[in-house]
Amino acid sequence: MTHEVNCKQARGDAVQATLRRSAATRPTMDTVLSVVVLLALFSAHHPGRSHAFNLMNLLCTNGSSYSLNSTYHSNVVAILGSLAADASNSTVGFATATAGAAPDKVWGLALCRGDVNGAACASCLALAPTVAFGDGCRGIRDVTVYYDRCLLTFSGEDFLSNPDDPTAPLQYGLNLDVNITGDPAGRFVELAADLVGALSLWAARNSTSRYAAGVATVASGQGFMTTDMDLVHDIYGMVQCTPDHAPDACLRCLGRLRDEMPAVFNGTTGAQFNLVWCNLRYEVFPFYDGSPVVKLVAPPPSTLAPAGASAGRNDANRTGNAATVVAVVLGVILAVAVLVSTLIIFLRRKAQVKQRELSALLFRSSMATANFAEENMLGHGGFGAVYKGLLPDGRQIAVKRLDKASSQGLKQLKNELLLVAKLRHNNLAKLYGVCLKEQEKLLVYEYLPNRSLDTFLFGEPEKRLLLGWETRYRIIYGTARGLLYLHEDSQIKVVHRDLKANNILLDGDMNPKISDFGLARLFSDDKTTTVTSQVVGTLGYMAPEYAAMGHLSVKLDVYSFGVLVLEIVTGRRNTDACFESEVDDQGSCTLLSYVWDHWSKGTALETMDSSLGSQAPESEVLKCIHLGLLCVQENPADRPTTLDVLVMLHGQTSSFAAPSKPAFAFVTLSSAGEGINLSGGLPGLGDQGAAAGFSVNEMSVSEFQPR
């Protein structure tokens, strides 16, 4: 479908009139050059869902301009491409960015509708630059483009620092083709406003993407007649805030839009209201994809009593009129109360149904696993045993069963439940439910047929052969994406603390999913580091500052990721002792020191897993080794962030910094093979301090709890 920008003259005149009325009350709108562009989306025949991308609004503010060959223009081009890529790759379809330096610095934001997938998000955002650089906005420094499935904005002013700006210009558009007739009481817009209110609560409180779509239905025979002689029974609505908005801020933003609805409503069957930080829309046809999360049923309209006689009536008649007014008011109050009660009952029943479904799922777990039969056991860890099961609907599940005598395991189970329930990403294992009944404590996960990475990487040789280089690289990349979500993109910042090959599960296509959040730690938005007195995790994957001093940050996961990358490339466990022929004159015998020795000598490719043969591209292997060594550097500040890791996986090694010697690089075995001496030492301790720190007599270090 081509995107036409020529609107019907009547539609354009009405829009201009609306804008003139709006300008009288909003001084900031005086700067508008090009505004509401309504397209064929508002057709007289209600086309229903359309997978085309329709331009809804366009805002260009006439603050200042730039030339097309300027530095500002280059920054705009760069930021638009960056925003489209980042938003389409994000699980919530959202990204912000900056480019350049003052006075040519550009701030930008991109947001895709909550029901749009990554490919559609990218396609929608790819259309925005054409409009932004078109005749209406060419050379304007501040531009916002609203499509029905995405929005993109850039500005020479830092609008990102003030997302709750009450003076931000509001855009809206109306469906001027079809109108509601015979609705003097304004029930249509009231019902639309009630739907928007319910959706706003849902989006703010129950959705990490801050998106919700729903429908409000009136009883049969109580519909709304339209100018095209259709009887409308359903109103479809959608609301969305940017995912970085806190619930209360989201409600405030949507509340501002909802308050505008009665003022601009003129009997039309649809409207959309847009701010950069939130938007809403309602129509009489389904315009969104997916199922509605909110379904409202409107109460029947209250019957108005006949009006009283003229002013010459006696006191008795005036008393009767007063009673009529009171009755009308009470009727309205009753109608509102019924609507609110209906919503409460609906939400309560939905929660009860969900609870019953969850309970049925959970209490069928023992049946699904054949009462936890030995032959269904997939493995056993510090938490307890994991069993394979099959639900009646055909879904395969993995049930983690806590050992009944494990008090530490119960704490980890609760921690895992609280965290995983809030996390949704393709590279995280999906939690179906939980059971904490009497002595049984279970977590029910999706079943991943290829189990964990370590069974392939360190298992039988024939299994290792299934891990070709393309598969290994995909596992590295997918794990990095999962970590980025935990560290940056989710609504809560999470440090996993136990990232290792055992906790990377593989689906049927060998895609990685991070699992086991029993030891994970939650951080608030304004705090990214802490010191803990309880060091937990797996030896060999712990960063030195955490193992020795309890310093906890996201750089702990980065260190563990670096160890994991080197294990994937070399096919060796980080705890494996090297063969005697591989021990150099300094006694290197750990994986990190082994890789570092070859890196220093320029023979890093010799560390590659021999089972890969010649199929692995040397450039990619060297890139992963380089990346792994950067992640395991001793100083946390020198390690890349998870965002840097993903950028590196897309980039060339020529842009990488040179790695420094890894932490815990050199470990010497005694001549008798008895005991281990950390000759490299712990940070700040030196050789003597390291030996004392790990003395078998009068140990004085944090208690380790390996998984």
Image (tube, rainbow, N blue to C red):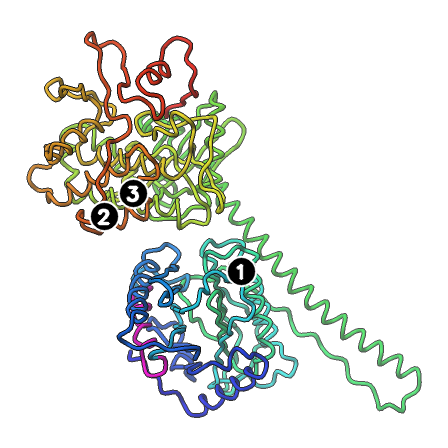
Residue 569: % across, % down: 18, 36
Quadrant containing the N terminus in the rendered view: bottom left
Q: In front: mark 2 or mark 3?
A: 2
Instruction: Of the two numbered discs 2 and 1 on the same chain, state the one appearing first in sequence.
Output: 1
Instruction: Of the two numbered discs 2 and 3 on the same chain, state the one appearing first in sequence.
Output: 3
Name the residue that disc number 1 marks.
250
Q: Amino acid at mark 2?
A: Leu
- Count neighbours of disc 1 (C-alpha within 10 A) and say few if under 14, some if 14 to 19, many if 20 or more: many
What separation in Å lies between label 2 and label 1 (alpha carbons)? 35 Å
Name the residue that disc number 3 marks.
479
Determine the residue located farthest toward the right in the rendered image.
315
Q: In front: mark 2 or mark 1?
A: 2
Q: Is residue 606 left or right of residue 430?
A: left
Overall secondary structure of the magenta section: helix
- Does residue 276 lie above or below 616 as drawn? below
Name the residue that disc number 2 marks.
649
* Residue 149 in magenta stretch: no
> What residue sits 22% from the left and 32% below the top?
567
Q: Amino acid at mark 1?
A: Cys
Quadrant containing the C terminus in the rendered view: top left
